[in-house]
Structures are given as C-alpha cells and as structure tokens.
Amino acid sequence: MDKIERRQFLKLGLYTTAGVMMGSLFAFSRTDKEIDYKSPEDLSKFDWGFLVDTTRCIGCGACVRACKVENNVPDSYFRTWVERYEIDKNGRVRVDSPNGALESFKDDNFNEAEIVKAFFVPKLCNHCYDSACTQVCPVGATYESPDGVVLIDKERCVGCGYCVQACPYGCRYIDHEKGVADKCTLCYHRIQKGEAPACVNACPRAARIFGNLKDPESKIRKILNLRRYGTLKPDLGTNPKCYYIGLDMEVK
Amino acid sequence: MQTPDSFVFPNELHTTWTVMIVLYPYITGMVAGAFIVSSFYHVFGMEKLKPIAKFALVSSLAFLCFATVPLLNHLGRPDRAFNIMITPNFNSAMSGFGFVYLFYMTIVVLEIWFSYRAELIDKYLKSKGIVKKIYWTLILGNTTVNEYTKAYDTKIVTILAAFGIPVACVLHGYVGFLFGSIKANLWWSTPLMFIIFIFSAIVSGLAVLIFLYQFVHWLRRKPVNQDSYELMAKWLWGFMIIAVVLELMEVLSISYENTERWEVLRQLINGKLKISYVYLQIFVFSVGPFLILSATTLIKSIPIKIKNTMIWGASMMLLIQVLLMRWNVVIGGQLVSKSMRGFTEYFPGYFDKEGLLVSAGIILVPFLLLKLFDIVFPFFERPGEIK
Amino acid sequence: MLSNKKHIILVFSILLFLLTAGIVVRKAMQPDSYGFAGNYRWDANQEIMKQPVLNQNSKTCSECHESIYNLHEKDAHYTVPCVDCHGAGNVHVAFFKGDSLNGITKQQAYLEKEFKLDGCLLCHQKLVARPADFPQIVKDDHYKFLHVTDPKTQCIQCHNPHEPIFLLTDVKNSRLHPIVYKCTECHSKTPEKSPKEVENHPTIFECKDCHAEITADFNSKPHSKYIDCRTCHLYHKENETTGRIYKNGNAKFCLLCHEKKSFRDEKYPPKIEWPNHVGNTSIISKSDEKICLNCHEDKIHQMHLSKAQNPHSVNWKSEHKDIAGQSKEICGKCHTSNSCQNCHMKSKPSSHTADWKKDLHKVSGAKNPSSCETCHKRNSCYGCHKLDMPHPKDFGETHKELIEVKGKELCSNCHKEDFCKTCH
C-alpha cells in the first residue's frame, strides 16, 4: 500500500467520524449522563492531576485522534500531541511531531543503528498550579476551577492571544473560527460525569494516568509516591500538575 | 523552513501576534513621545519649543485615536473589547490597559480643550449656521473669555501636562512591560524591556514631530522656526543614543551571561533576524541617523537648508528604526520556539485582514486625521501672526 | 470671579457624570455569576460541563457486546480500548440505545473498523522510539519471517484484533515475572560476549539463567533455529522491575504459522489444512486449546518444570513471607529492591481500616478467602478464631462436636449470646 493511499484512508476515517459526529452533535445532550453540579466547596475536594509515563508510550497517536474528535479541535491545532526524541551516537538530537502524531510516526529519522536512545513524550496542558496563562488573561476568561483545572470561559474571552504568548509549553492556540483561545480542559465535561479524559480513555498502554491528587488512595497518588517523576520547565515557577515519568533533559 | 534538527511545538506553527501588534506599540510610542515633547514646553517651560507645543499635543491626540484600531482588528472577538473594563483580572499586566488608555485620553482631550478654548470661542463668534452649532457644542456653550480665564486655563494645562508625563510613560512603558513580563518568551523576558520602550517612544515621538513639522512647512512654503527645530534635533540625537545603547546593552548582557537562552537567541539574531535586526535596525537605521545627527549638532558650518534636510532625513530614518525595532521585538520573539529547538516563519500577507495593506492604512490614517484636526485646532500661527 | 471658573467647573462636572455613568454601566454589564467563586464567571464552569461525551468507555460497549468484550479482555489487546479502532462510537450508542428519534440513520450509526494494515501499524510499526518490549514489526520482515507471499495480505487475515495472539492463559492471570532483557534491547547488535564475561555489566537475566533445563531442551529441537523463547512466551514489561510473561501453546497460536493459507508460502514452514489435519473434528469442539501439543510436544520443549528448576513452589505466594522476612538479600539475587512494592504498596492494604479487624474483614474474607492468602497464611484465621474460617460447608452438622470440645465462648467471639436461639 503506498503512501497516498494510506493517508487517504486515515483522512477518510477521520473525516467520516468527524462528519458523523458533527451532524448529530445536538442529538446527544439528552443521552448524556446526568451532570452532578457541585458547589465550589465540594469541587475543591478534588485536585485533578495528570501523569504521563513516557517509558510506556508507544507513540501511536490514539490520544491525539481521540482528543480531536472529542473536542472538535481545529485542523493543525492540538490540545495534546506526541513528540518523538531520537538521539544518535554523535549526540545529535532530533525531535519531531509530524502533525502532532495524529497519524502516528512513519519511520525513524536516523539510521536505526545510529540511534542510541529514543522515546516518545506526550504533551498536553499542564494545568499548572501557578499558571502563567491564568495570570495574564486580562478579562478573567481563563481561570482555575475549584477542582484545579485551568479552563477558558469562551463567552468572555476576547481572543487577544496574550495567554498563548504566556504559556511556556505551547499548549494554547487561538481558535480562529470562534475567535477565542482554546486548550485542553482535561475533558472537564467527561470527568464531571465520572469518565476519564478522552486521551486517557484512548491510551492503549496506560501511559496516561489521571486522578485526584487530594485522594491518597487514587492511582495517580500511589504511582507518584512510588516512582521518580519530573515536570516540564520547573524553573519557570509555573508548578505544573502534569507529571512525567522518565523525563530526559532534552525534553523541554 | 524546518531543518532536520529543529523542532517547534505543533501549535506554534501559527504566529499569534501579527503585524497589528507591531503597529500598536509603534503608534502609542508616537503618542507618548509627542505628548512628552509638548510637556517640555508646558511643564518645564522650554520657550524654544513653544511653536510646536500645540502641534505636538494635537498629533498626540490624532495618534491616540487610532492606537486601538490595530488592537481591535487583531482581537478574535472585538465585540467583547469592553470586557477588559467590565471584568478585568488585575493579576494580568494587560488588564489595566483600558483604564490607562482612557485616563490618558481624558488628559489629552482636556489639555487640548483648555489650550484651544480661546481660539474656539473666537471661531464660534465668527462662524454661522451648522458650523456655529458645532463650535457651540465644542465650547460647551460657555463663551466667557478674559485675562482671568486664560490664566486659569494655562494653569490647568500645566497641571494636566504634569500629570500626563507619568501617564504617558506608564501607557508606553506598560506596553514594554506586557512583553518584558512574559517569562515564556526568551527574547522578550527582560526587565529592561519597558525602559527601552519608553526611550524608543520618545525617539519616535520626536522623530515624527520633526518629520511632520518640516514636511508641513515645505508644503506651505514657509521656513521652520530654526531654534525649536534644531533643539528638537538635539533632543532626538540624545534620546536616540540612549535608546539604541539600551537596546544593544540588553543583547550584550544576555550574550555575556551566555546561558542556554543565548544559545537560542544567537541563532535568532544570526538567522531569522539578521537582515531586519542586525543590518537594518542597527547598522542602517541606528548608526546612520546617529552619524547624521552628530554632524548637524556638532558641525556649525553646515548651510541651514542642507542641515534641515539632513535632520529631516534622520528623523525619517529613526521612524523606520523604531518600526523595525517593534517588528523585531514582537515578531522576533514569536519566531523562537518555546521548545528552544527551532524557529517559525512569519509573513503577514499583502491583502489579509491583518496584512500589509491594512497596516499601511492604519499608519496613514492618523496623518489624515491630523490634517483634519488642523482645521479645528490650528497648530501653527496663521501667516499674519508670524512675528 | 466665579463666572471665570464656570467653564472649568462645567467640564469637570461632565467628567464626573461620565465617570459615575461608567461605573453604573460597568456594574450592570458584569455577568451575574461573576466573582461567585473567583475572578471569573461561575456559570462558565457549568457550561463547560455540558459538552457532550463522545468517546465511549469500553464498559459501555461491553453492555451489548459482552462476548467480544470478554474475548478482548482475555488476550493481549486487553488494554486497548474499543475507541482506538472503532472510533468515538457516540452515534452508534445513541442509536442502539433507542434514541433513534433524534434522526440518526442506521448508516451513521455504523462503526468504523480500523483493522486494516495501516490501522494496526499505527501502534505496531517498528520504531526505535517504541519501547523494545512492545510487539512491533517491519512489514516486510514480518512477512518474510512468516513466509507470506502475497504482499497485500492484511493483518486481520491471521490475527483477530480482539484476540491477536490467542493467549493460552487469561492475560490478567499471566505470571508476574522479574524483568528479562534481551541483549538487543540495549545493544544495537547481538554482542558476541555474554554479559557475564563483561566487567561491570549490569545484572541481566536471560531465560536460561533460571530455566536451563528447558532452554537446553528447546535448543536441541528444530524450532530453536527459527524462533526464540519470546516468540511464544510474549513478554510484557509492566514497570521497572517486573513484567508479565504469557504462556503460549494454544492451537490457534500454532496455526498463526502453520495453517495453510492462500497468501502464504505453501511449503515453508510446514503447513497443515485446518481442521482436516485433526481428522476427527469433534476433538476440537471439546475446547482443548492445547490440542497441538497433545501430539507435537516433543517438537518444542519439555512442558513441565522440574522442581529443581522452578525457583518458587506452588504455594509461594503465601509462603514467601517467612523467607523474605528473614532476609531480603535472598530476593535481591533476582529481584530489584523495590519489587516487593509491586504487591505491597504499603505496609497494610488500604482496605484494612480501623474497623477491619472487628467487622469488615469477614465480608471479603467469606467472599474470597484466597485474597487473604496474598499476605496471610492459610491458617492465620485460626490464630484468633480457633477454628477454620469461614465456616466449612458442613459446619451445620459438625459444630455440635466442636462446641462440646471447645466451649460456647468460642461462638461469642463473633456471635451474640442469643445467636443459638435463632435455630435452637
């Protein structure tokens, strides 16, 4: 099967899903599970955190595809994406993320024998405790919910793009159709209904772990107590809440 | 283009802040600069600058009216622009923008109103029909004018101008702060940023005044007031030295610290910004005007006509220098990937919503407005009034 | 005098008026719920929650497709959620849950199936960046290895995506096993020296280190020329110290290579017609999954570990406490220091709360006595209860004797005094 055919197949699949989804979006609000609207005090019993085990990630891009469909993310923008790091024996580092790994990765960039180390790093909004984007939003459209998720009020956002500049992780974008900023919500609509975020739901390797950091019995807490982890760009003082197992110094 | 060893985050392929955000600090720079020049006369009593004080004030207003246009054109939802005053988040450096802008606008309008009151009343008395109605509205129906009111007006103008200087500095230094406080951006994040912005604002303000002053007088075939013209040239010379040195010192200190950050910025300066920053902004449009202005200031024997042309040329070059500086800061900063592994591309496009044609329009409209203002608020003395 | 200041007063009163008007308008324009929980519109939080859920949970799929779900849970793809191959599935679920009123056609409700080669290669394309223990192929090499002649062959022609490798044991019951490395997981080529010959080489366990007898046997058999241990005993790294090893001897697994199919080389490796090869098809229906091994065991390796070869006895789970308690160094010979934590995340399981001893443990103890045996010895109930717990089935008949011997007080440990009256 040649390259074009492969791409067409993928595109077709993606578009059909998206098309079917869009055509009947309105229909599903009724079939949804009941939402339990909690007061801010009740919500503050939760502190949603995220953990990425990079040693388990296979870079299949299922998370990226699931996220695109779930949140109707515009083309060429990403709420989550997967990066590949390849280091060869001369110490050269090659990083890539073709189309955010929406269609996974095709070939190694270096000659296979030359590569000494290679791994995938999924990225998404870090939902920082001291998020730079919340700090700079001039109209109070970006906020941290009581349960610790950084969200955007799309009814108030003016689309100035200041938050996009302020995010050190490149997790935000301006949705030009709606003219407002957008980013990962940790699938807030799912987690409030007891479902895992779409990317966690789609991960075939349990490389993405999601849970309540305030609950000492949660899986994420237990793993964080057990494993050694890091965060991205800790020197910027944003205190990310997305933890990474198996980070390399090359990952920025 | 992406080289094999470079990488940018997928969301960074689109430049968020376009050439519109280049124009905004450029225009406010001229606002703040022109206002400060007018205050030299009003507050510090530099009599030599009297001939251009009013002109400076009115041009400040003309630019101020258009300062928000590029911003509104850039906003994703311009219809919600007032959210910034309805529900401001005061943790944000940007949230005060609406208030500072409005406060400054009030000061400039009041100052103009008080300085032109006597002339407006005079025009009201001489005009007829609808024009008279308009003037009546402008003077708020009050026609009292005598020695006392003039004294009061001058006093208020002085107070307003004194208030205005810090506000002008805040308005523009604040734009610098907007950039300088973004820790995520390697090229912007420096405490020097707002100082550089204030000085470059004064440079652009002085430059645009010199440029227009000479230009208008050529059109009207009248000689400029040589004293104030040369004084402004001297000031321009001084401020451009400070501004350019600060700009270079910033890069120097980053390069001398030689952190990981310099490793990336070095590539930026030697790569994407080589032409617009190194060659144009520094060598042609900074060193060039510096040499010209040094000559006009230090060498007394240059004939006046040539000297004035040289000053005018230098002021035009400095206007371009400041525009380049805004471009290199705003666009240059966004070219650097936050992954520290590569650079993006940006070209505004010619006919896009935020393209070059619209930009040219936005820059030119304040000048046309200024022409319109001249009818209502004449900046220069009428032919008969020249001493 | 005042008349000379009149215009000043006028201007500033207009300003004051505008300012007041501004403040009033601003207040009126602020959204109702603004500032309720912080410097934002609280209603926005509710609005975001209303976004419909599209990607379905595999549990939802299992409500209707139970048999496929169970099959899928059993085999190596058990961690792969349905959405990865079938798409979000929200339309499908809405339609078949009887919400056909909202205008979805059956056409729209049809699910995507990414069982084609490219769909599989999204995960299984060989990439250096993929963890080495993850099964991945270079298409050409894989086809060459299996002597597939038709290059258009799709994965699904051999592998059932719901049951890709036909594991013999349920994947979740597969053995936890210390990590076994292949040389090629670190080295790009298979080194000539064995790790033991290299100075300061990190400790490496290979299959033959513990299972020498079987590996030796296997090496003497024809299979050893073409496949290695891991071809059948798939190994799946679970974390830094342990993984799971899958037993395999399922007939369907053997057929992956040995069944005669149109797209395969006819002769090599040896092919059979299935199920004609067996002759009597009724044997197959007896669900004897190891049917191939019944005859061909000798072609592979001996199937039973002799006592000396298996480091741990059958009851190891319950017995290891004593040995590990004496000295952890013994464990350290094979296991890394934090292996214990894989099961013993804490000193005590979270379920063992303050009420555990008093009431709670009897419920789960009765339901699943073997769960206690993870840590406790089989007879540890005896320590407190002085009798076998939970009560054996015939306790109704036998308890009379027991009470005669041990006295009524024994019952009152758990039961109230008038408990006997409920029957007697």
Image: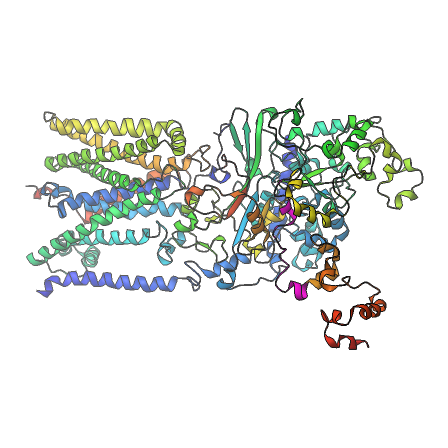
**Identity of the residue drawn at 38% across and 27% down:** B270
Closest to the observer: C159 or C11? C159
Boundaries of the magenta span: C336-360
**Extreme-right residue of the structure:** C280
In this rendering, does residue C390 appear at all? yes
Is residue B379 among the parts visible in the rendering?
Answer: no
Q: Position of residue B373 (x, y in %)?
A: 22, 47
Write down the quadrant of residue C381 in the picture. bottom right
Asked if residue A157 lies in the magenta stretch, the reply is: no
Relative vertical location of residue C403 with respect to residue A87 in this rendering, above or below: below
Please tell me whether the stretch drawn in magenta is mainly helix, strand or loop.
loop
Count of picture labels: 0
Quadrant in which the N terminus of chain C appears: bottom left
Nearest to the observer: residue A60 or residue C167: C167
Render colour scheme: rainbow
Q: Is residue A10 left or right of residue B235?
A: right
Question: Which one is nearer the viewer's eye here, B20 or C131?
Answer: C131
Can you give x and y, in whole percent of width and height, for residue B274 in the image? 36, 27
Q: Is residue A200 left or right of residue A167?
A: right
Q: At which x and y percent is residue C14? A: 23, 62
Using the rendered view, name the quadrant where residue B351 is placed. top left
